[in-house]
Image (cartoon, rainbow, N blue to C red):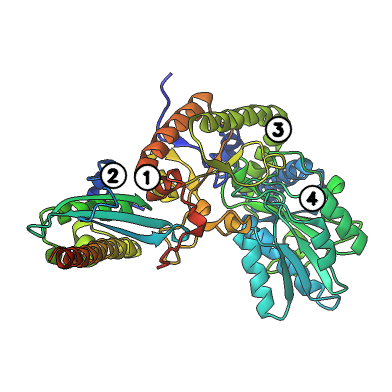
Amino acid sequence: MAYSNKVIDHYENPRNVGSLPKEDPNVGTGLVGAPECGDVMKLQVKVNPETGVIDDAKFKTFGCGSAIASSSLATEWLKGKTVDEALAIKNTDIVNELSLPPVKIHCSVLAEDAIKAAITDYKKKQGAAGKSAATNETANA
Amino acid sequence: MAVKLPIYMDYHATTPVDPRVVQAMLPYFTEHFGNAASRNHPFGWEAEEAVDKGRKQVADLIGANAKEIVFTSGATESNNLAIKGVAEMYREKGNHIITCVTEHKAVIDTCKHLEKDGYRVTYLPVQKDGLISLDELRAAITDKTILISIMTANNEIGVIQPIAEIGAIAKEKGVLFHTDAVQAAGKVPFNVNDLKVDLVSLSAHKMYGPKGVGALYVRRRNPRVLLSAQIDGGGHERGMRSGTLNVPGIVGFGRAAELCRVEMEQDTKRLRGLRDRLNDRLHKGLDEIYINGSMEHRLPHNLNISFAYVEGESLLMGINDVAVSSGSACTSASLEPSYVLKALGAGDDLAHSSIRFGLGRWSTEEEVDYVADKLISVVSRLREMSPLYELAKEGVDLSTMQWVVH
């Protein structure tokens, strides 16, 4: 099957491949998909706690060219967005940008899921950190 | 010497027609265009003579008598004719057929069709090496069994089934034995009497002949096999397959079969050398790669490897100047990887990571080296990008992880 030029570009020059420290309280990690389905995405965001803006985003993907391109594009879009803006990214935006054919729409869905999973993880960590910080303050008082 | 791109390494899908075959065919399109069934003029006689020669050449390749060859449009038709033809003809004797889960779709779907008509089909599993168990075959045979259909060599993993042993069991039990020998015939020695097979499907375009022509070997004695025709008409091919014969195709098929027979020994030796070279290079350059299917019982020109932690389609995208096939089917709506690899119990993730290499008459050492080097670099790059590779290197057992199946 033929890939769009944008998919090929992301496949050949993937943006933001790599990993951020999982234990960092400002890093949210999403791992979605399954090996038996032929695609797994790991997407990470690093959020500036002062501004709520995503400073950095990284991905690693096991999957076809469209899955790699979808996650690569997602990391590009995430940088500079606030957490709430990031949650507004829809899979259809990715489909349109990369001209994905119908059989590859699941790749974009997976990318959207990965964004949501990463942000959920970040929020969970913040919630937990907030609680422990509060406990500390009580103890100090 | 620089290699010419793209490189063709998908000889299990089809083969180019040998120029010597094309030469043999050409006069039969123009000068000698007669209908082989025209009995009363020289145009017909010439065509018939050419068909007889082609029939003899195809028969010689598999140690058969020329009268036992029925020409068809290809192996899909041969498989349909063999299985449906036997099923209909021997309905009174029984309604049970035994085949195997890794057969070509032309066999499996034909059997499924018969199941709808009230036949019972046993699909034997395969072991980890891709071979069926002879004990399981024996146990599956009942007094209602009329046919065993087991392929000689698999089209994906190149694994060669124990045909002679299966033939002996079939003979002992009085059951007919059909084999789809499309991938094996012309590539490895194959003799219908040594192997005790009753029906054999063949295809010209897998052995450097033209597309659109195939054959079914139908045994004439010990036992004499009868078939219900699936195409009715002028009663060609001893009534088993009506339709004007494809004279140029049959001439080409015959010449291709003859070349395969004469050159088999040297071709096999050369291709085995190239295949082993490819395999050695890949194993030296990469860790965690796994061969699918038995290496011992295998076509000399086949290699099927899973590159763990890398998805097949993205791998193909990285080697887009090399024509090979992947067991991953991410393009299909079902997302189902190769049913053949799944049947080996390799795990779906490894099935998604597989590449089939098929070498052939025009494959060269330079091509093998180019493909090996390119694969090593692409697999390494994709693994750097693979979350599974990262997890595995961290010591995480991927099989125990909870995945969100979507």
In the rendered view, does A115 fall on the left or right side of B331?
left
Query: Looking at the picture, does residue B2 appear above or below residue B255?
Result: above
Provide residue B1's location: percent of width, then percent of height: 43, 18
Q: Residues within 10 Å of mark 4 (few under 14, many from 20)?
A: many
Callout 2–callout 4 Cβ contact below 8 Å: no
Q: What residue is shown at x 36% (from left), y 41% (from top)?
A: B384
Q: What residue is shown at x 76% (from left), y 71% (from top)?
A: B87
**Residues at discs 2 and 4 both on one chain:** no
Which residue is denoted by mark 1 in the rendering?
B317
**Residue B11 appears in view:** no
Which residue is denoted by mark 2 in the rendering?
A18
Which residue is denoted by mark 3 in the rendering?
B264
User: Which tag is nearer the camera, tag 2 or tag 4?
Assistant: 2
Chain letter for the residue marked with disc 2 in the picture: A
* Mark 3 or mark 4: whose residue is earlier in sequence: 4
Q: Amino acid at mark 2?
A: Gly
